Amino acid sequence: MNNPISALFGPSPIRPIQEHMAKAQSCIALLGDFLEASFSKNWKEAEEIQQAIHKKENEADTLKREIRTHLPRSLWLPVARNDLLEMLHIQDHLANRARDIAGIMLGRKIEIPEELVECVRDYYQKNLNTSAQALKAINELDELLETGFRGREATLVEELVVELDELEHQSDVSQIKLRAMLFQMEDSLPPVHVIFLYKIIDRLGELADISQKVGSRLLLLIAK
């Protein structure tokens, strides 16, 4: 049990994948605190939270490298090694996006116009809900393996993914509303500031898009 494979994976190759997704989700959760600090223009607090996000993202990267290095090439499981690595790759984008958003906003001290704050807050929450649903689905992987990706557990995961798709749609609707509001304000804001606001809106929306991809990947596993 002292070898790196046993230490990392224990009795299941799925546990580290789930832990990685949990770390990615923690980055997104911290992003909400970062946004709140930026709303109040408390850039000192925002910097501290940005550093916390960066630390969590580094932890996720370290775990990702360990999984890639030690994931056995031959698993007596109804799931291919490449499928697990692809899931890991998708999850990694979530932590990266949270890091990028905080980094861009802090680097340029991007202030969200007061008229947009509530809409941005709601938009972020919808994206957080979507990634949380993806984590919930990933946490069912153990049970899926035990049932051979069939039966009641497979049906449960399919239902979770349907809910995830609906949450991603809600994020899209919120994004459309937010972009329309910003469009109406463009003339009153510095052009460069507008460009970066649109970039932040897009990056936030990518959190939901990537989370949906996690769900789609799970459905592919069930379909095989």
Image (tube, rainbow, N blue to C red):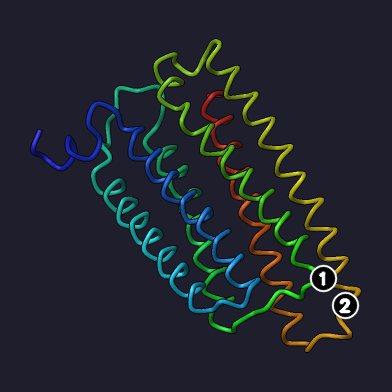
57, above or below 82, in the image? below
Q: CA distance from mark 1 to mark 2?
A: 9 Å
Provide residue 177's location: percent of width, then percent of height: 85, 59
Residue holding disc 2: 185
Q: Residue at x 49, y 65 (%)?
A: 99
**Which is closer to the viewer, label 1 or label 2?**
1
In this view, which residue lies farthest toward the right? 184
Which mark sits nearer the N-terminus, 1 or 2? Answer: 1
Tag 1–tag 2 contact (CB < 8 Å): yes
Work out which quarter of the rendered image holds the N terminus and state it: top left
Q: The disc labelled 2 sits on which kind of residue?
A: Met
- The crowd level at tag 2 (other Cα within 10 Å; few <14, some 14-19, many 20+) is some
The residue nearer to you, when weighing 186 against 146, is 186
148, above or below 130, in the image? above
The residue nearer to you, when weighing 54 against 32, is 32
Say which mark, if any, is on residue 115.
1
Q: Which quarter of the picture shows residue 51?
A: bottom left
Q: Residue at x 69, y 31 (%)?
A: 163
